[in-house]
Image (spheres, coloured by chain):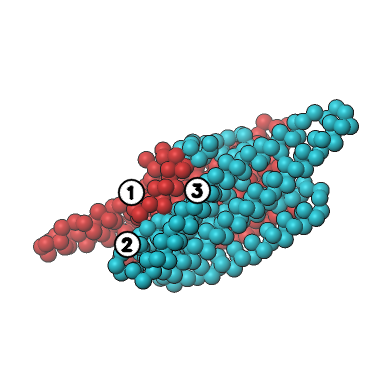
Chain colours: A red, B cyan
Amino acid sequence: MLVEKTVQGFTEELASESPAPGGGSVAALAGSIAASLVSMVSNLTVGKEKYQEYEDELKEVLEEAQGLRKKLLQLVDDDTDAFNRVMAAFKMPKETDEDKRIRSQAIQKAFVGAAELPLGVAKCCLQAMKLSEKVIDNGNPNAASDAGVSVLMAGAGAKAAALNVEINLGAIKDEAKKKELKESLDGVMQAIGELEKKLLGKVKEKIN
Amino acid sequence: MLVEKTVQGFTEELASESPAPGGGSVAALAGSIAASLVSMVSNLTVGKEKYQEYEDELKEVLEEAQGLRKKLLQLVDDDTDAFNRVMAAFKMPKETDEDKRIRSQAIQKAFVGAAELPLGVAKCCLQAMKLSEKVIDNGNPNAASDAGVSVLMAGAGAKAAALNVEINLGAIKDEAKKKELKESLDGVMQAIGELEKKLLGKVKEKIN
């Protein structure tokens, strides 16, 4: 598994001439890092008398963030698997008409999977960013820059995922499916754009 | 070293109640991932007859990107060290006036170091983004989304580094030093903002 490599080894694998892992796995990793920073700020807040008022809320945030951190780590590997399924479909036999029909169906199915996966990553990044808001508002203010970095990483993860949805949408022939995925992506990305702007404004106020 | 942990272990360490590693190390990691993706796109371009025209240029980009990837990985650990030096300075004895004077100087020195370090990370992220432009323009277009993700990660890394410069600037009393660092940061971040916007526009054109 990719996430069992060292951080250094992961960057080496990424930098290599193999097309996978690539930007799709990076999107999921950025989201997982965002969730990790939300956990950290929650951990630096709960159990401290000064922030007792928000104890219960931040315990819930912590639990949700830990779940997202793990889910997004899984998606680092899943994205590379989805990409590899596209490559495998292209390598299917294409000698007879029946071969060609089956291969073409498999390619289309693989592209839909490779578009749906980063769409799921973008949705998880939006969830992570919503949790960032809670630690910005009620978390330990000494960690305000860490909360801000969680917003930036969730935003970059979602935008990176969106590029990966879009590049795969271009290969999908089922227009209804394509429209459905595109509309879902647009909704998530609009929410990401608005929330990121709002939260970075809040972080700047806390830091300055 | 942090970068010798597994990716999964790194996120666990990040998520823990320890304030280091935090957002500063994440900024450097995001930059290193950006440089890795530039390397990958270069690797998917060089040696292919179709892109022979850009062979020499992209070999240079590859070498520079590999250097940046490694330098930024080193900065992942260096940032955590810089943060720990601030914490260590605060723990120095403060019994006598002489103690207090020495401690206060050490704290100030540590804060300057903790601001200079992420400023260096932001500069490296700008270099990585400049390399992204070369792979967007002349790299294998099949990897256009990966080149786009490198822009997003370099941008997020620089913005994350900037938050870490700013939070430390707030603690620096030497006004001349503070002004110098702030001006340098502003220059880097203006360049990042303009370049990111331009490059993401180019990527969208390639993908759609």
Using the image, name the chain to which the residue with label 1 belongs: A
Sooner in the amino-acid sequence: mark 2 or mark 3: 2
> Residue A182 location, x and y as percent?
42, 64
| Label 1 close to label 2 by CB (< 8 Å) | no
> Residue B131 location, x and y as percent?
49, 62
Label 3 environment density (alpha carbons within 10 Å; few <14, some 14–19, many ≥20): some
Element assignment for label 3 = helix
Using the image, name the chain to which the residue with label 3 belongs: B
- Out of B1 and B17, give the one closest to the viewer: B1
When the figure is inspected, residue A103 is found, relative to residue B2, above or below; the finding is below
| Residue depicted at 88% across the width and 28% down the height | B96
Q: Quadrant of residue A62?
A: top right
- Measure the C-alpha gap from mark 1 to mark 2: 26 Å
- Out of B12 and B78, give the one closest to the viewer: B78
- Out of A51 and B35, give the one closest to the viewer: B35
Left or right: where B23 falls relative to A115: right
When the figure is inspected, residue B118 is found, relative to residue A58, above or below; the finding is below
| Residue depicted at 58% across the width and 35% down the height | B16
Element assignment for label 1 = helix
Q: Which mark is residue B47?
A: 2
User: Label 1 sits on what residue type?
Assistant: Asp
Q: Which mark is residue B70?
A: 3
| Label 2 close to label 3 by CB (< 8 Å) | no
Which quadrant does the C terminus of chain B fall into? bottom left
| Residue depicted at 34% across the width and 68% down the height | B51
Q: Which mark is residue A81?
A: 1
> Residue B118 location, x and y as percent?
64, 50
Left or right: where A44 falls relative to A50: left
User: Label 3 sits on what residue type?
Assistant: Lys
User: Label 2 sits on what residue type?
Assistant: Gly
